[in-house]
């Protein structure tokens, strides 16, 4: 093979969805800039036992570094500590564990995002109204922190009442079901905050079924570009707003390679967020489309490089053969 493997990086994702896909793509693309890196990605589909098995198997495989997004903090902490104690560097992404036995963390500040959502809602409702929260998986740190940030921000506006909160496990269909039940119980809802855009879309589906989608505003988190995702939902006014939750796969790989190659690295890398609303959604769509084209070009270049390397090594062999003869 033209490219020899020097480092194996194991990735254990808690979930399998468009947000994870984007991060995985960024990880793979960034790895192209470091010759000799092999990426092995596993996905646990929101199942703790599966994620523990995935990490055990990556440890068994002898990976040089682990990148993990832990599904639920308590459940996944022991296996991460096990890897760390064996001397495998661990980079946590997006969600955290209940221990400081990890090498680095890369992700946005979920508490801060929760606070920003809270201030946005307070402003949008002019300090008064009924709010419903459709939360992510209760035992994942991103959901816990988003909730805490929201509550802290709303402390200053007592007339905004959180009338119901449901755990919809980060998923669209459970969100539709949970919010459908809430709609039936509460005739007066002004604002729905879903911990991600996928659940916001599920909640919206439920509201459409009860012809109530125009009675309330929907706010989400993630702001993924691409058909049907957050930014488009804002552009076509299904969502009132969303907040960018950066996938940051390139940054994750950069930190991982700094660790592997013995360079200085930042232990906690905080990725930033920003509000996406009707004022900037269209611009974001245009810009991300352009970035997407550039990303594809990088991948085309890499494939061409592979072909050239292949050709070069076979020509070299031919040359040796000629010399020997
Ligand atoms: C993706 C996801 C995102 C969410 C994040 C929270 O798997 O559900 O939609 O923002 O995880 O950890």
Image (cartoon, rainbow, N blue to C red):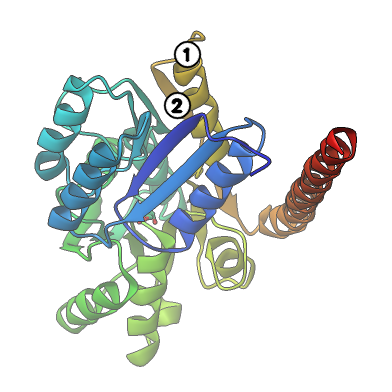
Residue at image mark 2: 270
Q: Residue 187 carries which label?
A: none
Residue 39 on image: x %, y %: 48, 43
Residue 126 on image: x %, y %: 42, 51
Q: Does the residue labelled 1 lie within 8 Å of ligand 1?
A: no
Instruction: Find numbered disc 1 in the image and state the secondary structure of the residue it sits on.
Output: loop
Asked if the residue under mark 1 is in contact with the one under mark 2, i.e. CB atoms within 8 Å, the reply is no
Left/right of residue 12 with respect to residue 302 in the rendered view? left
In the picture, the quarter occupied by the C terminus is: top right
Q: Distance between the residues labelled 2 and 1?
A: 13 Å
Q: Which of 54 and 235 is in front in this view?
A: 54
Left/right of residue 27 with respect to residue 88 in the rendered view? right
Q: Nearer the viewer, residue 127 or 94?
A: 94
Instruction: Find numbered disc 2 in the image and state the secondary structure of the residue it sits on.
Output: strand
State whether residue 289 is above or below residue 266: below
Residue under the image location 73 percent in, 51 percent down: 299
Tell me if residue 147 can be seen: no
Q: Residue furthest front?
A: 325
State whether residue 266 is above or below residue 288: above
Tell me if residue 197 can be seen: yes
């Amino acid at each position: 093979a033209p490219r020899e493997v020097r480092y194996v990086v194991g990735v254990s994702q808690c979930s399998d969805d468009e947000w994870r896909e984007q991060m995985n793509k960024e990880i793979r693309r960034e790895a192209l800039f470091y010759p000799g890196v092999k990426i092995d990605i596993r996905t646990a589909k929101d199942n703790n036992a599966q994620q523990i098995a995935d990490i055990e198997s990556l440890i068994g495989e002898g990976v040089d570094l682990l990148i993990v997004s832990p599904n639920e903090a308590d459940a996944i902490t022991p296996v991460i500590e096990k890897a760390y104690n064996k001397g495998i560097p661990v980079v946590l992404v997006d969600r955290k564990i209940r221990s400081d036995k990890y090498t680095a963390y890369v992700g946005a500040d979920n508490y801060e995002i929760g606070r920003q959502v809270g201030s946005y809602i307070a402003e949008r409702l002019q300090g008064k109204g009924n709010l419903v929260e459709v939360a992510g998986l209760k035992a994942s740190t991103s959901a816990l922190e988003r909730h805490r940030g929201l509550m802290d921000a709303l402390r200053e506006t007592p007339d905004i009442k959180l009338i119901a909160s449901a755990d919809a496990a980060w998923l669209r269909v459970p969100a539709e079901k949970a919010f459908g039940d809430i709609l039936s119980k509460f005739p007066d809802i002004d604002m729905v905050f879903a911990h991600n855009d996928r659940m916001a879309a599920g909640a919206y589906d439920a509201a459409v079924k009860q012809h109530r989608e125009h009675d309330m505003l929907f706010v989400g988190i993630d702001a993924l570009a691409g058909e049907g995702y957050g930014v488009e939902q804002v552009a076509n006014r299904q969502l009132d707003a969303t907040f960018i939750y950066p996938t940051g796969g390139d940054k994750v790989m950069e930190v991982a390679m700094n660790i592997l190659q013995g360079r200085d690295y930042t232990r906690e890398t905080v990725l930033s967020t920003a509000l996406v609303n009707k004022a900037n959604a269209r611009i974001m769509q245009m810009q991300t489309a352009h970035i997407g084209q550039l990303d594809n070009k990088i991948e085309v270049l890499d494939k061409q490089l592979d072909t050239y390397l292949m050709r070069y090594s076979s020509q070299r062999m031919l040359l040796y053969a000629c010399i020997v003869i």
